[in-house]
Image (spheres, rainbow, N blue to C red):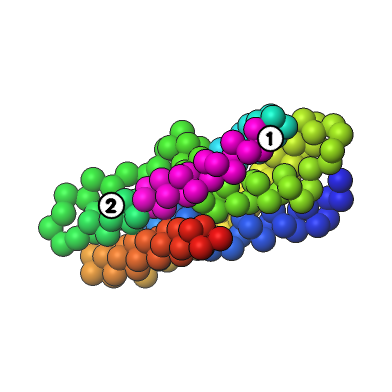
């Protein structure tokens, strides 16, 4: 297994905009870096477990994974649109602002409904997993995914945390949350369109 292209692929997939990075940026703005740590670690742990589960299932269920790919994409995109609605409503004037940080387990479970995470995991397995020694290789890939993913989501969270000082006015925070909600919804629709047109 060639580590350099594998790590490059995982890093590019982890650091580019997507549902996870939009969500941790919004969390960094609303709750700060420290309170977003469970969200960040949940993302990376969820992806690592996703790699391992897919490798275990892939040997005997490649056809099954292809059959559930579109329904998973539809469910994942619907969930992203619901999250964007929650984010937009939480910042509305006069709202009770019951918004709370995403927990470790919520972030971990979200990876199974996240279309971009599925694309990353399945493409990595197809492109980089050797024929022999699949489980040890999968554990290696999962570890590299954490090494690439944690700094990536931390960078997006830090960016959101840094923006907090400019978004202390309610109207500015509302505008930011509405922009993030719009980006999350647009990402969901783009991923859904891409999946259905494939």
Q: Residue at x 70, y 39 (%)?
A: 142
Which residue is labeled 1 in the image?
A: 58
Between 123 and 62, the residue placed more toward the observer is 62
x then y, percent, for residue 160: 45, 61
Left/right of residue 59 with respect to residue 169 in the rendered view: right
Left/right of residue 25 with respect to residue 167 in the rendered view: right
x then y, percent, for residue 82: 31, 51
Element under label 2?
helix
Magenta-tinted stretch: 61-80
Left/right of residue 134 with respect to residue 38 in the rendered view: right
Which residue is labeled 2 in the image?
A: 86
Q: Is residue 64 magenta?
A: yes
Q: Residue at x 43, y 37 (%)?
A: 106
Q: Residue at x 68, y 57 (%)?
A: 11
Element under label 1?
helix
Report if residue 52 is visible in the image: no
x then y, percent, for residue 173: 30, 65
Q: Is residue 49 magenta?
A: no
Q: Which label is found at residue 84?
A: none
Q: Earlier in the sequence, mark 1 or mark 2?
A: 1
């Amino acid at each position: 297994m060639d580590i350099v292209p594998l790590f490059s692929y995982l890093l590019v997939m982890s650091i580019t905009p997507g549902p996870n990075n939009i969500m941790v940026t919004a969390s960094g703005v609303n709750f700060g870096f420290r309170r977003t740590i469970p969200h960040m670690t949940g993302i990376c742990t969820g992806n690592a477990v996703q790699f391992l589960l897919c490798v275990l299932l892939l040997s005997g269920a490649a056809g099954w994974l292809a059959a559930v790919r579109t329904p998973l994409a539809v469910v994942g995109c619907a969930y992203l649109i619901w999250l964007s609605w929650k984010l937009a409503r939480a910042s509305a004037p006069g709202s009770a602002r019951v918004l709370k940080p995403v927990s470790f387990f919520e972030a971990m479970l979200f990876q199974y409904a996240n279309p971009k995470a599925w694309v990353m995991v399945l493409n990595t397995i197809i492109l980089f997993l050797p024929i022999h020694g699949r489980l040890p290789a999968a554990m290696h890939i999962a570890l590299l995914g954490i090494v690439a993913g944690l700094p990536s989501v931390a960078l997006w969270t830090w960016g959101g945390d840094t923006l907090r000082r400019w978004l202390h006015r309610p109207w500015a925070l509302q505008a930011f949350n509405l922009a993030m909600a719009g980006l999350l919804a647009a990402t969901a629709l783009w991923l859904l369109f891409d999946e259905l047109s494939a």
